[in-house]
Image: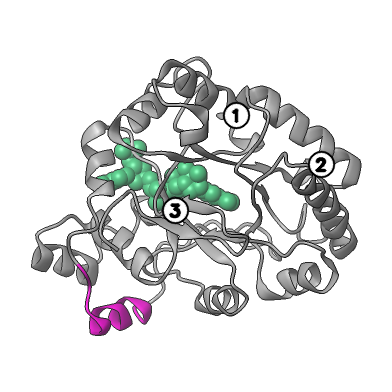
Amino acid sequence: MNNVHEFFVLNNEVKIPKLAYGTYKAADGETYINIQTAIESGYRCFDTASFYGTERSLAKAIGQSKVQREDIFIASKVWKTEMGYEETKAAFTRTLENLGTDYLDLYLMHWPLPSPDFKEWKQLDLDTWRAMEELYHAGKIRALGLSNFLPHHIDNILENCQVPPMVNQIEFHPGHTQESVRRYCEEHNILVQAWSPLGRGRVLKDSLIAGLAEKYRVSAAQICLRFALQKGVMPLVKASSMERMKENQDVFSFALTKEELYQIDTMPPLGWSGEHPDRERQYV
Ligand SMILES: NC(=O)c1ccc[n+]([C@@H]2O[C@H](COP(=O)([O-])OP(=O)(O)OC[C@H]3O[C@@H](n4cnc5c(N)ncnc54)[C@H](OP(=O)(O)O)[C@@H]3O)[C@@H](O)[C@H]2O)c1
């Protein structure tokens, strides 16, 4: 694992860069300078979603760059209110229009349930997945995935699908690694992507993380990203300056020891967003 140009290989043999730039709150209406800077800094993989409102900004930034569409890996997601067979097809069409492209590299179901009290989620997930599978078979999507799915949600898909998911995107950072989900995905050959890999900054001052940063002469953010990569997890990280973007990509010249990985794995809970698919949002 030596440099930012390396790839993970998904279970359908599609290659995905080891690091992505997350676009949530990275652009606002007409401004997309952060995404332009991210392309300039070297990112070639971008995570967006219909919910973020950043699809058009991403399209503009790519359009104004010298990088070809086929050299950029674009992931987007179908939102809670867009679930269902017909709704997903319509949502996908809107997403392609927003992104100014005729295919997606990765399309994810954003959450397994529209709300925690929604009883018919199994059928809704399968209807949504069937639409995604058809778009995949039609060559409109190169890889399919899930987001915020726990093992019991994924079982429902695996027991009923034609195309098994290639990716599951979950909150993952020191202090909240969802190890049972990560392990389940590893056993089922599903790549885990880490959202909020820095815990949105909430874990950077932790003494273990800060101590490791000092030992390796890197930043606390770099320790978090390196930790994810060594766990076989692909980080999606957002930053707002060229300096931070470059720093966040410079995570291939040092390696945490097995002991340090265990220490991070077992540190006390920290920095959880408060989001859980089966429960009401907690404000922690
Ligand atoms: N699937 C889902 O449900 C879901 C949910 C949430 C997020 N996501 C995805 O995950 C991506 C990343 O998550 P996130 O934005 O919530 O959290 P994050 O990447 O963990 O943290 C971003 C925060 O960390 C700061 N930061 C970045 N690099 C830094 C560095 N080197 N040193 C110090 N601080 C640094 C950023 O500040 P500045 O911006 O000021 O530089 C920003 O405040 C999102 O953009 C989105 O694509 C997905």
Q: Earlier in the sequence, mark 2 or mark 1?
A: 1
Disc 2 is placed on an element classified as helix
What amino acid is at disc 3?
Answer: Ser
* x 82%, y 65%: residue: 161
171 on left or right of 7:
right
* x 69%, y 54%: residue: 111
What amino acid is at disc 2?
Answer: Thr
Q: How far apart are the two marked residues, 3 and 1, measured between alpha carbons?
A: 18 Å
Circle 1 packing at 10 Å, graded few (<14), some (14-19), many (20+), is: some
Q: How far apart are the two marked residues, 3 and 2, measured between alpha carbons?
A: 26 Å
Residue of label 3: 196
Nearer to us of marks 2 and 1 is: 2
Circle 3 packing at 10 Å, graded few (<14), some (14-19), many (20+), is: many
Magenta residue span: 255-267
What amino acid is at disc 1?
Answer: Gly
Labelled pair 2, 1 in contact (Cβ < 8 Å): no
Q: Quadrant of the N terminus?
A: bottom left
Residue of label 2: 88
Q: Which SS does the magenta portion mostly show?
A: helix
Q: Position of residue 265 (x, y in %)?
A: 37, 78
Disc 1 is placed on an element classified as loop
Label 3 C-beta lies within 8 Å of the nearest ligand 1 atom: yes
Placement of 72 over or under 276, stated as above or below? above
- Give me the disc on residue 221: none
Label 1 C-beta lies within 8 Å of the nearest ligand 1 atom: no
